Amino acid sequence: MDAGAHTFYPELRPISEEFVPKALAVSGLDRDRLIRDGSACGAAAASAAQAR
């Protein structure tokens, strides 16, 4: 079985201007990129439902 075929990993667009800088640093994610390219929560949920 190909684990990649059964993986769902969306990167979500931030929903608030508030965040913890140290937590962001630990995650390794780029907040500006997520604002620009991240999925809206509803779109990610719909994709998850289709991926089942």
Image (tube, rainbow, N blue to C red):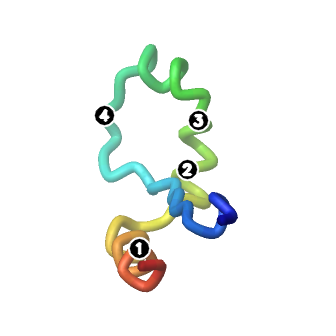
Q: Earlier in the sequence, mark 4 or mark 3?
A: 4
Camera-nearest label, 1 or 3: 1
Frontmost residue, 44 versus 37:
44
Residue at 55% over, 61% down:
7
Camera-nearest label, 2 or 4: 2
* Residue found at the very far front of the displayed protein: 1
Could you say which disc has been placed on residue 5 in the image?
Answer: none
Query: Residue at label 1?
Result: 48
Residue at 30% over, 46% down:
16
Camera-nearest label, 4 or 3: 3
Q: Earlier in the sequence, mark 2 or mark 3?
A: 3
Amino acid carrying mark 3 in the image: Leu
Q: Answer yes or no: do the residues labelled 2 and 4 have beta carbons within 8 Å?
A: no
Q: Residues within 10 Å of mark 3 (few under 14, many from 20)?
A: few
Amino acid carrying mark 2 in the image: Leu
Residue 12, above or below 30: below
Q: Earlier in the sequence, mark 1 or mark 2?
A: 2
Query: Residue at label 3?
Result: 29
The x, y position of residue 36, in whole percent, is 59, 57
